[in-house]
Image (spheres, helix red, strand yellow):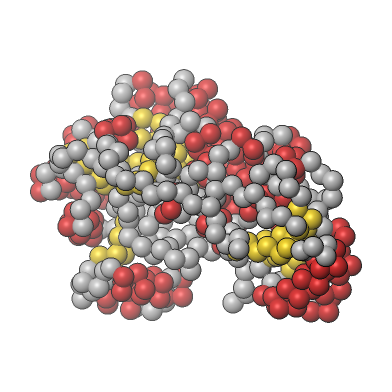
Amino acid sequence: MMRAPRVLHLVSRYRPGESQLDAASAAMQELSPRLGHEVLVTGQHRPAVPPLPRSTLAAIHYLSDGPLGEAARQVALTGWLLRNLHRFTAVQMHDADDQAPLVAMLCKTSGRRLVEGGIPAGTPRQAAAQQLGAYGVRIPTAVAAAPDTELGCDASITDRRFHDAAVFPAGPPLLLTTIDAEEAFNWSHPFSLDARDVVSMRSQHLAHRVFSRHGVVPVYLADYPVAAQDAGRAPLRELLQDGLCDVGAQMHPWVTPPHIETINESNSFAGNLPVALELEKARCLTDTLADTFGTMPRIYRTGRYGVGPRTADILKSLGYVVDSSLAPCWPPPGRRGLPGAWASAPKPYWVDADRTLMEIPVSAALVGRMSGRSGEALAPFLFGPRARRLPIAGGMARLGLLERIRLTPEGMTVPEAKRLVRHMLAGGHRVFSLTYHSPSLEPGNTPYVRDIAQRDRFLAWLDEFYTFFREEVGGRMATWQEVRFGSGATAEQPANTLLDALP
């Protein structure tokens, strides 16, 4: 198995008095946590680092050149690289041209790659912060002009240091229904810019026959192809005008302008994109939805649940108040090994100290007698890609020891959904989020509905589950607004701390 590349970003000659968005923090904010990048800063003064989520970066190192200046820096840098260069596959320099001969020699000697690009010496810091992308790839001026400096650094969907539990008044359990309103595409094929088939939106009325019986008002999280084409937006407009649904946003990067990145598996996760590009795509999607439906979307989901270290800051800057991009127990590729990636669904929580953006996770959990910490430790081996050919997970589920369940009619049975709800209720959960994909209502679009009979069973699943939730659980159907604006905020907020990786 090929290891993910680990890149060392070398930032040299830090000078006091510069903006907090100096070359070091620009690199920190752009790097993907799943790639294990690190930053090494050399200079007389410690950089002023803004409060960022710890998960943004594997580590930040600082070397002082001391009173001896350049000579001391050369010696310190040489020693550090000799001790640590073996941990990296490549080195990239930012504003460190004076170190190039030394670093090039050490990279060549050790067989490490020296990556060209980065922030050249003399580049204004604000412009540098906007231009630096993943692996130092520069993005076009039109996108770089959307300043990353407008974003705060005070929110994170995945870093618990920024989180605060949302407190709700007493009452029955609440159930949200969220639908990924998106184009149909072959899930086993590579991602394509040409995937724009939204004809399945014409079949959404079939589910509304079930919704009307149970008082369900779903929120359609629409992506760009749905909002930009009449075949997608017309059915939603009718439902919206009749008060039968609400509309939010869902980001599929590969079909959302601007199209300047390479379309591949990694870039299908919005959080892997350079921050300026993720911001610009989110802005384009938001504006398109507002123009199409006459109101700004305020609830958001990152397609494929691919949140990044700055996704929460982007959503706050665009006026969103709810995110639903967390998929517990189903970590996307590249995040399966991170701490907490296999943890069961947390309750809704605030992702910032201001309590302006709430995360409402999709309901999912590890269920069974071995659930808990022992289950989370076993989950990567039972449910990871390598375990699919083995019958171990099925045997564990049949014995009632451990199973992974998500609240959806796609690939889950009604008895499984009932076990999930009972398990989460026992754990103190009172807000549940059910989800599915809009193309599932047209046979042949998804693996879950291949013919009319399977679609009938899909709709019957919804009917049976809603009946169970209302009659057996005593719950009621709710909208995302009821959850977001009906919650209290009485929990104590832990103080945010600066990254303490700097000595």
Expressed as whole percent of the image width and height from the top left, the position of residue 145 reads 71, 34
Tell me if residue 253 comes above or below residue 390 in the rendering.
above
Kindly identify the residue that appears in the image at 36 percent across and 73 percent down: 377
Report the residue that reaches farthest toward the front: 67
Q: Locate residue 117 relative to residue 423 in the image: left or right.
A: right
Q: Is residue 474 visible?
A: yes
Q: Is residue 92 visible?
A: no
Question: Of 153 and 465, which appears nearest the observer?
Answer: 153
Tell me if residue 180 comes above or below residue 34 in the rendering.
above
Question: Of 310 and 285, which appears nearest the observer?
Answer: 310
Kindly identify the residue that appears in the image at 46 percent across and 49 percent down: 496
* The C terminus, quarter of image: bottom right
Question: Of 360 and 130, which appears nearest the observer?
Answer: 130
Question: Of 75 and 297, which appears nearest the observer?
Answer: 75
* The N terminus, quarter of image: bottom right
Q: Locate residue 298 relative to residue 151 in the image: left or right.
A: left
Counting every numbered tag in the picture gives: 0
Kindly identify the residue that appears in the image at 83 percent across and 65 percent down: 68
Expressed as whole percent of the image width and height from the top left, the position of residue 210 reads 23, 37
Q: Locate residue 499 relative to residue 399 in the image: left or right.
A: right
Expressed as whole percent of the image width and height from the top left, the position of residue 250 reads 48, 40
Expressed as whole percent of the image width and height from the top left, the position of residue 71 reads 86, 68
Kindly identify the residue that appears in the image at 27 percent across and 37 percent down: 488
Q: Residue 502 occupies which quadrant of the picture?
A: bottom right
